[in-house]
Image (cartoon, rainbow, N blue to C red):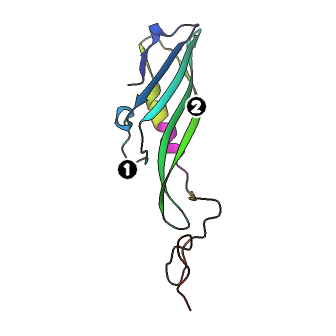
Amino acid sequence: MLKFPIKDITSAGLNVSQDVELSEIGLSQQEVDVRSPLSVNAVLTRVDNTVIADVTVNAEYGYQCARCLEDFARQKSRELHFDFEVASPMDVIDVGEEIRQEMILNIPQRVLCSKDCKGICAGCGANLNIEKCKCQ
């Protein structure tokens, strides 16, 4: 889990590195196609009544090419920054929920398997990256 007790976060900072499964932050494979555990590195620092979290998330994401419709995977690293205002009844900071929201909001609309993907022939349906067009 990526919940941290506020009492453990000081001005000196708290460094955290762990692998996290999607289900641990409330995500499913249907929401975000991640094909590896999330590798999370976080530095949490307390400044007065604010906790600052600088987080790096690495994972292998699955995509479908927008041109040729082939399934492919790509390693991706994301740098995230969160500020949590510490209120009196709070006793933990949930970084996992913030990561979950960022992952959903940043799903790309259009991804290509390569910048020179040739796509699919509109006539015969051939994947032009693999085979030649069969149209006459």
Q: Hey, which quadrant is residue 47 in on the image?
A: top right
The residue closer to the viewer here, 76 or 82, is: 76
Q: Residue at x 50, y 10 (%)?
A: 9
As displayed, is residue 74 above or below residue 22? below
Among numbered discs 1 and 2, the one appearing first in the sequence: 1
Image spot of residue 115 (x, y percent): 64, 60
Q: Amino acid at mark 1?
A: Gln
- Residue 11 tag number: none
User: Is residue 45 within the magenta segment?
Assistant: no
As displayed, is residue 71 above or below residue 37? below
Q: Residue at x 54, y 74 (%)?
A: 120
The residue closer to the viewer here, 88 or 109, is: 109
Q: Quadrant of the C terminus?
A: bottom right
Image spot of residue 31 (x, y percent): 41, 48
What span is in magenta?
101-109
- Residue 30 tag number: 1
As displayed, is residue 41 above or below residue 105? above
Image spot of residue 14 (x, y percent): 52, 13
SS label for mark 2: strand
SS label for mark 1: loop
Q: As drawn, which residue projects farthest toward the right?
A: 116
Q: Residue at x 36, y 44 (%)?
A: 28
Q: Quadrant of the N terminus?
A: top left
The reply to whether dot 1 and dot 2 touch (C-beta < 8 Å) is no
* Disc 2 target residue: 80
User: Is residue 104 within the magenta segment?
Assistant: yes
Viewed as shown, does residue 56 lie left or right of 22?
Answer: right
Mark 2 burial class by Cα count in 10 Å: few <14, some 14-19, many 20+: some
Q: Residue at x 53, y 71 (%)?
A: 130
Image spot of residue 60 (x, y percent): 48, 43
As displayed, is residue 118 above or below residue 62? below
